[in-house]
Amino acid sequence: MSPMAPLPSQVGKSLPDAIDGAVRARYGYALSEANGKGQLERVTPQQWKVCFQKPGPLSDSVIFGVVRAQETCPNRWIDKL
């Protein structure tokens, strides 16, 4: 089996668009609130945007650091994953 191609950056995209990009590339994904507030379960994906991206624990996975769409991305990712 050949290695997976790296997932193109999804940073700056809405969360639904980033998820679509990951799924099209056959990547699994996880989410982490980039500012460490831990409120992801309270809103719909359309209300979030991607600020950071890093490889996930598996070669075909990615973790997106997200904030609410109206918020400014933090300078650094307070990653709890």
Image (cartoon, helix red, strand yellow):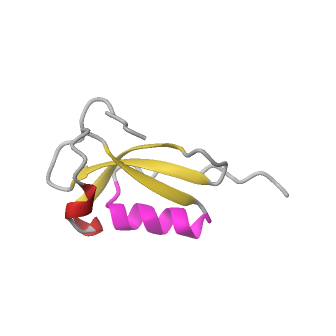
Give the mark count. 0
* Quarter of the picture holding the N terminus: bottom right
Of 50 and 58, nearer the camera is 58
Image height of 75 relative to 36, above or below: above
Q: Tell me the magenta residue range.
A: 13-26
Image x and y of residue 40, in percent: 26, 56
Magenta stretch secondary structure, dominant: helix
Side of 58 relative to 29 (left or right): right
One can see residue 62 in this view: yes
| Figure quadrant of the C terminus | top left
Q: Residue 33, percent across and down?
A: 30, 46
Q: Is residue 56 left or right of residue 81?
A: right
Look at 22% across and 53% down and name the residue there. 39
**Residue 60, above or below 17:** above
- Residue at 24% x, 69% y is 44
Q: 37 or 47: nearer the eye?
A: 37
**Would residue 8 be visible to someone looking at this image?**
no
Q: Residue at x 47, y 48 (%)?
A: 63
Q: In the image, is residue 54 part of the stretch drawn in magenta?
A: no
